[in-house]
Image: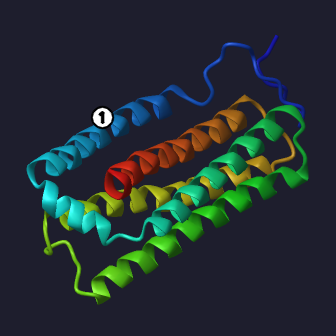
């Protein structure tokens, strides 16, 4: 019995890991790299507690909260879109991916306003170690969001095909996995930079 049909009705085998092996290797590697970033931030909190506390207090937590809500909402839309592709695909399923893209663009706009406000008030990566890490690591994450938007565009286009076979579902699931990684990384960055 095949894992997926060649029609719009797609069935998922129980116990199967979604997506392709390559995406999971990429996710594992990216998590290792970001774990190093998280350790660097945590060490900075220990070594320069006063500088980090003062700098963190100058961040607008509601900007971080809004970004978190945008990414969580985007991930929810992606998850619903993937499930619809598996169980009841139709021409309208792509709207969930479109809404996720809009959430990603909202994140980019919000982050741009935040950075612009900091830079216009004289705060930049040279201000202190906290802001150096803040701009570098949120910048690397922002790059992930931009790539994620392109990936969700790809899976949105894939979801519009008249037939979703095994290959198309692997593309959709792999793209969704990357988007969820972006979300997970932001949650950790938000906690380390805005809340600690």
Residue 76 image position (x, y, % from top left): 69, 47
Question: 5 left or right of 101?
Answer: right
Which residue is more in the foreground, 53 or 41? 53
The total of numbered circles placed on residues is: 1
Question: 38 left or right of 85?
Answer: left
Residue at the image point whose x is 34% and y is 64% from the top: 139
Q: Secondary structure at mark 1?
A: helix
Which residue is more in the foreground, 191 or 95? 191
Which residue is more in the foreground, 105 or 7? 105
Q: Is residue 178 above or below residue 133?
A: above
Q: Is residue 161 above or below residue 21?
A: below
Residue at the image point whose x is 77% and y is 32% from the top: 165
Question: 3 left or right of 17?
Answer: right
Residue 179 image position (x, y, % from top left): 55, 47
Query: Mark 1, residues whose alpha carbon is within 10 Å: few (<14), some, or many (≥20)?
Result: few
In this view, the residue farthest toward the left is 47
Residue behind mark 1: 32
Residue 114 image position (x, y, % from top left): 41, 76
- Name the image quarter holding residue 38: top left
The figure's colour scheme reads rainbow
Residue at the image point whose x is 72% and y is 29% from the top: 166
Residue 125 image position (x, y, % from top left): 19, 72
Q: Quadrant of the N terminus?
A: top right
In this view, the residue farthest toward the bottom is 120
Residue at the image point whose x is 37% and y is 51% from the top: 189
């Amino acid at each position: 019995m095949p894992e997926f049909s060649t029609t719009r009705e797609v069935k998922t085998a129980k116990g199967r890991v979604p997506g392709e092996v390559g995406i999971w290797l990429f996710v594992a590697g990216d998590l290792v790299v970001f774990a190093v970033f998280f350790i660097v931030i945590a060490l900075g909190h220990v070594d320069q507690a006063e500088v980090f506390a003062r700098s963190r207090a100058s961040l607008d937590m509601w900007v971080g909260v809004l970004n978190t809500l945008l990414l969580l909402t985007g991930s929810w839309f992606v998850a619903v879109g993937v499930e619809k592709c598996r169980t009841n695909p139709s021409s309208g399923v792509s709207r969930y991916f479109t809404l996720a893209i809009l959430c990603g663009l909202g994140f980019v706009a919000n982050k741009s306003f935040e950075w612009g406000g900091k830079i216009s008030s004289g705060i930049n990566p040279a201000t202190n170690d906290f802001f150096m890490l803040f701009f570098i690591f949120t910048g690397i994450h922002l790059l992930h969001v931009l790539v994620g938007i392109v990936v969700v565009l790809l899976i949105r286009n894939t979801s519009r095909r008249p037939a979703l076979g095994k290959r198309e579902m692997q593309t959709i699931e792999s793209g969704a996995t990357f988007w969820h990684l972006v979300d997970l990384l932001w949650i950790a960055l938000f906690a380390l930079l805005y809340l600690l």
